[in-house]
Image (cartoon, rainbow, N blue to C red):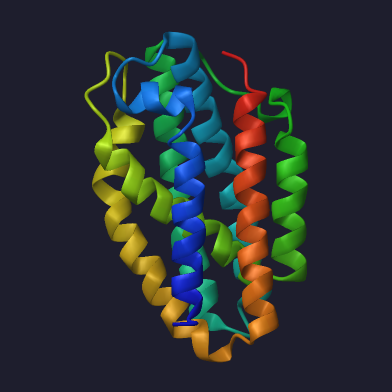
Amino acid sequence: MNRLENKLDNEVNEYLSRVEGMKEVRALLSEEVSRDDYVRFLKTFFAIEHLSRRAVLKAADNTEKTNPYLSARFRACAKGEQGHAEIALKDLSAMGVEGVDIADIPFADEYDDLLMSEADSFPLGLLGHSYLFENASGIMFPKHKKLPYPSKFIEVHAKEDPGHSLAIKRTVRAIQPDVNSEQQEDILGFARKSGDLLLKLFNGMTA
């Protein structure tokens, strides 16, 4: 089948094969993650939620008149991301790490520029970004074992993201008839760019 949903699912599976092969991720899911790496994960989770919220709100503004349905879905996504960013900060605070300055995170500016530019030039690209992470999270986080650190962020995502995955699949099905083949490739390409840059951000993160 040549549907956008199937193509995006292939991107998710390829991304997961890379991510779950990382030694830090294997340690995270098997409860053997070090404190420093766990702090790096939480800071990365905060960054992706914070930056995604900014971008999808802009995408919502840019599609409000041309595609009210998609705009509403972007706004619903932004609301969830705000709450999740706050949960990551609370987990960090419980570990003695107070506050995260996004300006101090290597490559965060580059990621922000990428997302905000896409929200302006091709808001549908943000749908590929969100699809990648909602589905990867919905598959990966339910596999986690109980961690010896504050882990509300992971627990919430393990519980909620399988449902979020279904919701964004419905969104993709709804917009599919209006997306041509070139736009589909642009959506897929942006999902790859975003996934690559998140890994770059994590690899550059310090505890």
User: Could you say where residue 71 lies in the image, as x and y percent from the top left?
Assistant: 55, 73
- Residue at 59% across, 23% down: 100
Residue 149, given in percent of the width and then of the height, sits at 31, 15
Image point 44% across, 19% down: which residue? Answer: 38
Does 79 sit left or right of 200 as displayed?
left
Q: Is residue 52 above or below residue 203?
A: below
From this viewpoint, is residue 61 visible? no
- In the displayed structure, would residue 11 be above or below residue 81? below
Quarter of image, res 181: bottom right
Q: Quadrant of the C terminus?
A: top right
Q: Where is residue 84? Give x, y as percent.
A: 42, 41
> Which image quarter holds the N terminus?
bottom left
Residue at far bottom of view: 177
Picture quadrant where residue 91 is located: top left
Left or right of 185 in this view: 11 = left
Reply above or below: 103 against 171.
Answer: above
Image x and y of residue 117, in percent: 77, 58
Task: Name the residue rendered at 46%, 59% in the picture.
Answer: 77
**Residue 77 visible to an observer of this rendering:** yes
How many numbered marks appear?
0
Q: Quadrant of residue 170?
A: bottom left
In front of the other: 119 or 202: 202
Which is nearer the eye, 146 or 19?
Answer: 19
Q: Residue at x 55, y 66 (%)?
A: 127
